[in-house]
Amino acid sequence: MNNLHGILFAYSATRRLKELSEHRTASSVPFGGRYRVIDFMLSSMVNAGVRDIGVIMRENYQSLLDHLGSGRDWDLSRKRGGLRLLPPFCYTGTQRGENYFRGRMEALGGVSSYISRIRQGYVVLADGDIVVNLPFDHVFSEHLRSGADITCLCTKNFLESDYTEAFYTLNSKNRITDIVSGKAGDNSDAYESMNAYIMSKQMLENLVSHCAARNLHHFNQDVLQAMKDELLLYAYPFDGYCARLTSVGAYYKHSLDLLDPDIRAQLFPRGRPILTKVRDDASTYCGQDSVVRNSFVADGCFIEGHVENSVIFRGVKVHAGAVVQNSILMQDTVVRKGGKLSYSVADKNVTVSENHMLMGHSTYPIAISKGAVV
């Protein structure tokens, strides 16, 4: 798809992710045994033939830089185009003590020179903090067919956001007739915005100029809501699996969703693989007396203990006599002999000492910071 350019917003973050986002953005939080959250939206674009993608960052982006690199693992390392990482900028004045852009339109205004050099005629904008596998090729075809000024992706599977979102009311032809910010309320017919949009490059440039001239910052309020009667807005309802990781509880819940074969089939369909940074590990070793039940286990692991109903990332070691139940263990975590984890989320390089036990609850899982020894 040579006429579509991708722009990803990788600045989304939430304090409710606590230990998981201390040193990274929500977009670079590890998920699903080997991936980062941004891999899902980035791969969706690449699978649709998008070969030029810009990633707008905000803060705590060192982890993201390390993960994305040159874009080689997504076939985006190119002499012309490919992956472009767009660092944050400061604006005059502060808001809550932060010197960063205040909304998507201000972020786009800060990279207006990048937008002006886009070679393609159309642009897809999307957040990098949603776990989903989107058929952007079909969405683009529907955008061209409908003649819309902007096509907005939305879902009935509400994303449990902890910040203001847009909800759409649609007519029988999927044209957006009303937009409400906040909660869907009593409107059972409302669709929640996925913060993914397709429009022409010219339309994007016009909107960026309009908002910059009027000191407007937000896409939902200052563009969609303010201009819904002037613009032809159509929706693309997506009925597949999607999730936004807004808290430790949401991260825990959606990680264990991967144990459901139907959800795995929706996230990893044939023909639309999720690509990620390659790490060459040996196959996982399971000892003769080990027990592994109903778990999602990546390669490179060494398991001699008991693992049940858990998601295990690459390089994890579970020693003999250790028990891991209903937990998520990120890369290179070690659970020593006699250690026990239940309803826990262990970040990278955590060590659980011998005979130590940590137990949370399904509604309040324990989060262990990166590199901690407990």
Image: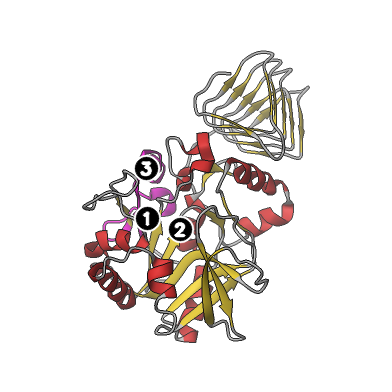
Residue at 64%, 17% in the rendered image: 336
Q: Position of residue 103 (x, y in %)?
A: 36, 59
Please give the label number shown on residue 61. Answer: 3
| Left or right: 95 as drawn, with respect to 306 | left
Amino acid type of the residue tagged 2 in the rendering: Asp
Q: Which residues are magenta?
A: 53-82
Q: CA distance from mark 3 to mark 2?
A: 15 Å
| Tag shown at residue 127 | 2
* Label of residue 41 in the image: none
Which of the marked residues, 3 or 1, is nearer the chain's N terminus? 3
Q: Secondary structure at mark 1?
A: loop
Percent coordinates x, y for residue 285 in the rendering? 66, 28
Q: Which residue is mark 1?
A: 76
Within 10 Å of disc 2 (Cα), the crowding (few <14, some 14-19, many 20+) is many
Specify the quadrant that holds the C terminus.
top right
Between the residue at mark 1 and the residue at mark 2, the CA separation in whole angstroms equals 19 Å
Task: Look at label 3 and name its amino acid.
Answer: Tyr
Image color mode: secondary structure
Residue 37 placed where, x, y %? 51, 48
